[in-house]
Amino acid sequence: MFSFSSRSARIAAFFAIAVALLIVLFPFVWVFLESIKPASFGGKPDVWLFPPTSDNWNNVLLQSDVPANILNSFVVAFSTVAIALLVGCPAAYAFSRFRGYQGARYSILAAEMMPPAILILPFFLVLYHLQMIDSLAGVIAAHLSFVVPVVTWFLIGFFDEVPRDLENQAMVDGYTRFQAFYKVILPAVRPGIGAAGVFGFVLSWNDLFYALLLTGGESRTLPVAIAGYWTFRGVDMGKMAVAILIAVIPVLILSFFIQKHLVRGIGGGAVKY
Amino acid sequence: MQLKHRLVLPLALVLSAVMLYPVAFSFWISLHDYRLTRLDDVRWVGFENYKFIATDPGFLNAMGNTITFVIGAVTLELILGLGLAILLQRLVRFQNFIRSTLLAPMFITPIAVGLMFRFLLNSELGVISHYLGEIGITVDWFGPQLALFSIILIDVWQWTPFMVLMFLAGLESLPKSPFEAARIDGASAWLTFRCVTLPMLRPVITVAIIIRALDAFKVFEYVFAITRGGPGDATETIMYYIYQAGFRFFRMGEAAAAAFMLIAVILVLVIALVKATKSSTAGRNNV
Amino acid sequence: MSYVSLQSITKKFGDVEILKGVDLEIEHHQFTVLLGPSGCGKSTTLRLVAGLEPVSGGKIFIDERDVTDLEPRERDIAMVFQNYALYPTMTVEQNMSFGLKAQNMPASDIRTAVHNAAELLGITPLLARKPGELSGGQQQRVAIGRAIVRQPKLFLFDEPLSNLDAKLRVETRSEILSLHQRLGATTIYVTHDQEEAMTMADKIVIMNQGQIEQQGTPEDVFFRPVSRMVAGFIGSPVMNFFNGVGTANGAIETQVGTFEGFPQIRAGQKVEVGVRPDDLIPAEKGETTITGKVLLSELLGVRAIIHLKTQHGLAFKAVVDHEIYRDMKSADEASFTVRDGRLHVFDSESGKRI
């Protein structure tokens, strides 16, 4: 299955990939097994055969706050991405097309790299003064600080790939520049917008740091809830496994669709492949 | 107003609100004795917080840990990522399936990764520790000696896929002819890799290292999920230090100063990296 | 006033002056080709006419209307771009309809117009396809179809054939020409390919360093180049040049011989004498000759190019018939004389024709 010339190289390659697959897949398999393990088998790491139970799933989905946490995470991620695309698309187009925005391009990159440690204190204090700690709006605002730059940076790369003559053509065809932008250029970068949106969604969905410090009680997002399963009083491994799978599965499915766009997006036009 | 400014205005407003203003506010905080417990008594202290932080053993330890973590994790990820990317490129069957599987870890929320490994490596309950014990190896993964290294391994598990993704795309975009020329010249696989593949991949490698290193500086979730900085302060990273200073001890001024020191360190590192590789990438960067 | 009129057009990007005052008059139904080396400003001129860039100075008129400050969409023009610029998300039919929709034409009229144009170009079977599914030649036709369907006042072509292979380029060239003859549309066509320019143009405009060097019919620029630059740019193989000095009795002395009969030459004036390789004919005895050592000969078919070097080391070329080529390729030396009236003389300092 490898195109190496020597047989030993093929065997070594096969072995290396097999080990890599095992290392990647093992934690997932194990978390899944843990989620269907009956409570009586808890704390026995060497037991692989047991009667599966749906107790943990029932408990988490029907009796815990996790469905509410899922909804919170979804609302936050969806709103953040919607705002990011709304402000990011026109700006990225401008950065890609007009003279005099070279500096702006790089400040977007710099913003993308801003450590959350700098921003969390003001966010916390302002929300505290507004009595908005424990509100989804606060988390959305905080998530905008990293989702907006990332989404914009992605989009710049995608707009750069659209030939300028396309909007020139539309303008010669009788449209204004803005019409050319939304009738011709936006449709042409639709796959890129999708990829940027999905990536931004995943980033927001996965965030713990801001959500941990800006939410509580009602407004907790899924990662915060997952962290809450392991307290100083102990851990409920089965339920935590369920919560982890719930957080991970949708993201893995989404990521599958954007993988091929991801590299171009991350490079943002800075790396030409 | 011109169209080009109108297009950018919404972004400028949003970023001013969630980026510029917080950074300015944060800088203002860093110049004050600002405690969450004494909000009515905020005093101007100039650069006292910076002076304190710069000599605080806790901060220096955290910075040391973080730099060790970044260098260790990024180096391992670079080597493994390059190797896996080359293998994946040579794969003729199941390529899509195997590639998607190997890339999966990078999309998962880091707190879940941290908790998974906390359990897998737990000295009494963990599967890995259990089977290692069966063959006579006892490893205290989160003990004082190994804890930081274990955290590095977890980061490697989650983020090597990112390197694979970048390098695979880079490899696939390389022109075929130099490789064919190398084959005709009779170059060995290793020589071809060292003298043809690696130089052509350099711009991609540089970008991948920079992105990954900047991200690794922000490591928080694994520490929060597993060690909470311990044992002692063996795994206290900068982000965790700032989190503690700001939200456990409520010393906002010091936390803000530490955050700006982090930026300074990151800046120096990025500039050094870019300078070190500038000549080789200049021809291929299009901006 | 002419149909299209450019009056003292200048264009600057920052401090760089791309166009330094271009004046151009184009008649109705005329096929005008802008020709020049890369960086001469020909594409910029076209983009200014289209309105894709604002002018820095001067005025542009189309059909007696001042369009200098109008948007591209208000100028009633159609343009075919080098890379075709087809909208990737639309079908061929939608691509061709897009400009008519902008004019709020009724849907049924748009359909008729698009189908007529498609018929004319033989692309009716492609109407439902997306650009990505078309070959380069087909994309080119769609781009042209999109332009003619609008029936604009003025067609602009920006090196439309440069992405096609050689055979297709020649085919499309004659197709554009016959289309032009049928529709009689006023056209400005930019290219750096002199063969394209010579075969297509009613009028060739040769540009150099942001200025018009010469404009006229293909015959004008080929047989009466106004400057050393035009003479060297037009024609293949390139014109031979020899340095010379004027004498008191209206002759020019060069290292390859003396040429007489130039009364306008001053004594001591430095000049360059140019002669096309095609205008060198094998010399009879007793004529003024240019003699050279045969270095190399290339048979092209009926004709052949002979590469020679004079005794002073000056390289030059001659184009001869294949019978003569047979004698010359084995010969050591060959002598030529210049066809009557085909000697071009340029002032060395100004580069202007004398």
Image (cartoon, coloured by chain):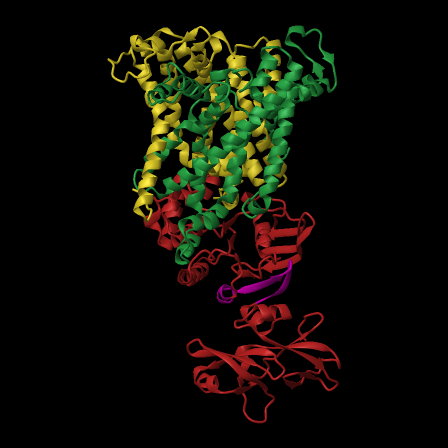
Of B243 and A109, the residue lying toward us: B243
Of B162 and C227, the residue lying toward us: B162
- Quarter of the image with the N terminus of chain B is top right
Which chain, by letter, is red? C
Q: Is residue A269 left or right of residue A38?
A: right
The region drawn magenta spans: C195-216
Q: Quadrant of residue B265?
A: top right
Residue C246, magenta (yes or no): no
Where does residue C301 sit, x and y in percent of width and height? 41, 77
Image position of C67 with respect to A239: above or below: below
Q: Is residue C340 left or right of residue B164?
A: right
Of A131 and A66, the residue lying toward us: A66
Where does residue C137 sit, x and y in percent of width and height? 39, 55
Image position of B38 with respect to C326: above or below: above
Residue at image location 58% in from the left, 51% down from the top: C49
Residue C197, magenta (yes or no): yes
The answer to whether residue A263 is visible is yes
Residue at image location 30% in from the left, 14% down from the top: A36
Q: Colour of chain A?
A: yellow
Image position of C323 with respect to B21: above or below: below
- Quarter of the image with the C terminus of chain B is top right
Q: Is residue B178 left or right of residue A134?
A: left
The answer to whether residue B7 is visible is no
Which chain, by letter, is green? B
